[in-house]
Amino acid sequence: LVSKPKTTKKCPGNIGPVNDEQAFAWALLCDPEIRIIALGGVAGGGKTLLSLATGNSQVGEGLYDSMLVFRPTKQLGDDMGFLPGDLGEKFAPWQRPIIDNMKLIYNGREKLAKDGSRFSIINELIEYRNLEIRPVNYEQGGTLRRTFTIVDESQNFNRETIKTLGTRNGEGSKMVFTGDLLQICGSARLDPTSSGLAHLIEALKGEPVFAHITM
């Protein structure tokens, strides 16, 4: 069991827990002994925002070297077809929710460069690889070390993808799976029982390095 934090420490942008469920999630996200976390719950419950805020704060404190966010490339509604550009440009629409949350965390703050121009703190985080946002399509092999990893909207991944990502969690790393099993989209083959997120929760239930909370 994880006790409710005695303090409600805030991250940049005054981001912090506002109810008991978020306080429990906050405690798990900040607990170095918990290596894998599943944060479930309805849209707007704060799963992604709290994960980004705590991960970014812990990277800043030197507990991790970087924060990595994986997102699915499933579309709502009709397929828009071919998207032009390189991989970064193609993936930009799926990066947007993470960028928007980071802007909220930093309240849109900018820094002043030596030449007098202003640049976004978020662009600086990405440029220096303190923050990466990637699709899962090419993530086979390798090990993530000293990395705070968020697998966002993980209800949309199948069992094999979740297993592939989970087994990349290396020494000194934490992996957070956020998702709502009632919001599966883009695949007729997945449902609340066959989703990789459901399999993860069932497979790791009772393990001392794992925690699960529904917001």
Image: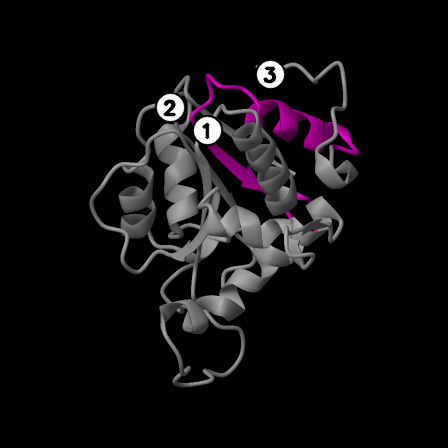
Q: Is residue 54 above or below residue 178?
A: above
Q: Which residues are magenta?
A: 17-46
Q: Residues within 10 Å of mark 1 (few under 14, many from 20)?
A: many
Q: Residues within 10 Å of mark 3 (few under 14, many from 20)?
A: few
Q: Nearer the viewer, residue 3 or 30?
A: 30
| Residue under numbered circle 1 | 64
Residue 41 picture quarter: top right
The reply to whether discs 2 and 1 touch (Cβ–Cβ < 8 Å) is yes
Q: Amino acid at mark 1?
A: Tyr
In the rendering, which numbered label is found on residue 172? 2
In-image side of 165 versus 184 (left or right): left
Q: Residue at x 50, y 51 (%)?
A: 126
| Residue under numbered circle 3 | 2
Mark 1–mark 3 Cα distance, whole angstroms, equals 22 Å
- Secondary structure of the residue carrying numbered label 1: loop
Q: Is residue 54 above or below residue 109?
A: above
Q: Amino acid at mark 3?
A: Val
